[in-house]
Image (spheres, helix red, strand yellow):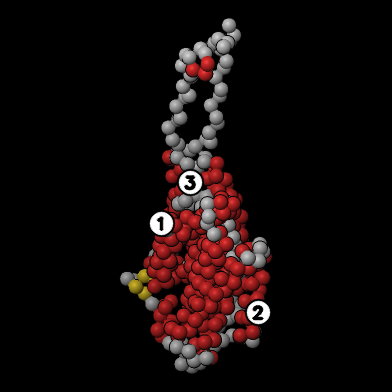
Amino acid sequence: MTAPPSSPAPPSRPRRRGPAAHHIGAYGLPALTVLLFLVFSLLLPRTFPTRDTVHALLSSQSIPAVLALAATVPIVTGAFDLSLGYGLGLAHVMVMQLVVNERWPWPWACLAVVAGGAAVGVLNGVVVEFGRIDSFIATLGTGSMMYAVTGWVTGGGRIVPGPQGLPPAFTDLYDSTLLGLPVPAFYVLVLTLALWLVLERLPLGRYLYVIGSNPRAADLVGIPARRYTVYAFTASGLVVAFAGVLLAAQQQIGNPSVGLDYLLPAFVGALLGSTAIRPGRPNALGTLVAVALLAVGLTGIGQLGADFWTIPLFHGGTLLLAVGLAGYSARRLRTGADAPREAPAPSPVPPSPGQDGGTPGTTP
């Protein structure tokens, strides 16, 4: 007789958080946004919780929100589009050039610029995927080329409308209201819902997420990763061009130096948004929440009388925090630690007498 062998230890399973912790991770950022709004409302009761402040938030943050959504799409595939700021500057300058100097009807000018933005997105995607160049380097190079085109079109100066100004219908794209709210807020809402639908409910979105999380697995299951990555950059370029149209309608002047100031807020919103709603995954609703948090924070800080240099400080610090939190959420998602706790697996049943050639505790 020999001593009965000890039963093998069950395989270790990733430690899973409970439902409460999971909800805190998913909805902590929206809760923080609400809390921050309440704090500034208590500190600035006469200026912050007013209709004018809300109206200004919805209007002034529409372009940063659109750009953040544009940055989100390539990030889903694991790529970064650093040409966003340059593309925004070129798009708004081209709208002004076509409307003011070339005398195009403004609808045709806007359509041509949006189509050109999509073409730039295709170029970025082709350079990244078929040229096998890192997305940081590739989009920085194409962005610098776009900045050169912007300077060539404007001659280094500004494009100023004549005494008659711009067509009122064109400026109304940004200045008008709907249901008492700025129209640009509805653009952001529609774009967010469209992006959410594509990423969360359509096969295209699932393919993009697979490419971003595991390109090798995407190839093994037959997903054409290169083609879908080009699609992602194309969508990003199209949305950036749309933001350029809004910027032209807002500023009503062609400024070749504008655009780069929007690059950092766009990436802060996109990366910070990947820690909310769907932690560890870039998503449209999370990006929208992140932009709202940044808008509330910057507006409150501004009304408290902070100096101008606090804005880049706020954006830079938030970017570092966003990258750290996004990486942490992605690691927890890969290990399964961010999933809700499930019922424990049943213990393995020991073999009954007679199985495996004998009775436990005896040698055959």
Q: In this view, which residue lies farthest toward the bottom?
A: 163
Question: How many other residues sit within 10 Å of disc 1, few (<14), some (14-19) or many (≥20)?
Answer: few
Q: In this view, which residue lies farthest toward the left?
A: 179
Q: Which corner quadrant of the image does residue 54 belong to? A: bottom left
Rendered position, 43 above or below 309:
above
What numbered label is drawn on residue 201? Answer: 1
Residue at (49, 61) in percent of width and height: 291
Q: Amino acid at mark 3?
A: Gly
For the C terminus, the image quarter is top right
Q: Which residue is mark 2?
A: 148
Which of discs 1 and 2 lies nearer the camera? The answer is 1
Question: How many other residues sit within 10 Å of disc 3, few (<14), some (14-19) or many (≥20)?
Answer: some
Q: Report the side of 293 relative to 317 (left or right).
A: left
Q: Kindly tell me whether residue 129 is visible in this rendering.
A: yes
| Circles 2, 3 touching at the beta carbon (< 8 Å) | no
Q: Earlier in the sequence, mark 3 or mark 1?
A: 3
Of residues 161 and 225, the one nearer the viewer is 225
* Distance CA(mark 3)–CA(mark 1): 22 Å
| Circles 3, 1 touching at the beta carbon (< 8 Å) | no
Rendered position, 255 above or below 361:
below
Of residues 6 and 330, the one nearer the viewer is 6
* Distance CA(mark 2)–CA(mark 3): 43 Å
Residue at (42, 58) in percent of width and height: 202
Q: Which residue is mark 3?
A: 25
What numbered label is drawn on residue 251? Answer: none
Element type at mark 3: helix
Of residues 201 and 284, the one nearer the viewer is 201
